[in-house]
Image (cartoon, rainbow, N blue to C red):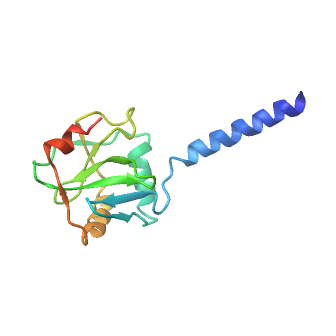
Amino acid sequence: MRRLATAGLLLLGLVCVSGASAKDFGPGDLRLCNAMRCVPVENRRVMPLLSSFYYGPRRAPVTRSPRLGAPAFELRFRNGYVTGIVASSELDRFLSYGVYLGRFRRGRWYRMPDRVSLELRTLARPLRPLRVSREALSKSR
């Protein structure tokens, strides 16, 4: 009985640790994508900023929406799940597609950290952008 309790506690500890570490992005866990291809976000200085933006204790700052037709890219997890879009000529605005319902609200745009926006613009250079459209806006959850 004691071994079973010990095994249960160890399993619980592993589950808690893996849940906590799941909120820390590693290089390549998030990708910037257009309609044809994706580029992994690998800059180790940007990863903690992205993790904090998605899962941090502070509220993500709300910003105004970009215009229809503005450049946009999808942000996807490694498994292909689209977390939302980043848009505007500065790639500094994020619209969630339901990645973390307790943090992001449907139809609301959030300001990306400046350092993240700079990195995303660098990664986006070889990619042809998508465009902010009514269809893209309708995917917000």
Q: Residue furthest front?
A: 36
The answer to whether one can see residue 64 in this image is no
Horizontal and vertical percent for residue 48? 45, 56
With 55 as the anchor, is 61 left or right in this view? left
Q: Residue furthest bottom?
A: 126
Horizontal and vertical percent for residue 96? 30, 42
**Which of the pair 60/79 is nearer the observer?**
79
The answer to whether one can see residue 10 in this image is yes
Q: Residue at x 44, y 39 (%)?
A: 57
Q: Residue at x 20, y 66 (%)?
A: 128
**Is 121 situated above or below 20?**
below
Locate residue 124: give its quadrant. Answer: bottom left
**Is 6 situated above or below 54?**
above
With 137 as the anchor, is 9 left or right in this view? right
Horizontal and vertical percent for residue 127? 24, 68
**Is 46 situated above or below 103?**
below
Q: Residue furthest left?
A: 68
For the C terminus, the quadrant is top left
With 12 as the anchor, is 108 left or right in this view? left
How many numbered markers are drawn? 0
For the N terminus, the quadrant is top right
Q: Residue furthest top?
A: 1
Q: Residue at x 25, y 59 (%)?
A: 35
Horizontal and vertical percent for residue 37? 31, 64
Q: Residue at x 29, y 51 (%)?
A: 112
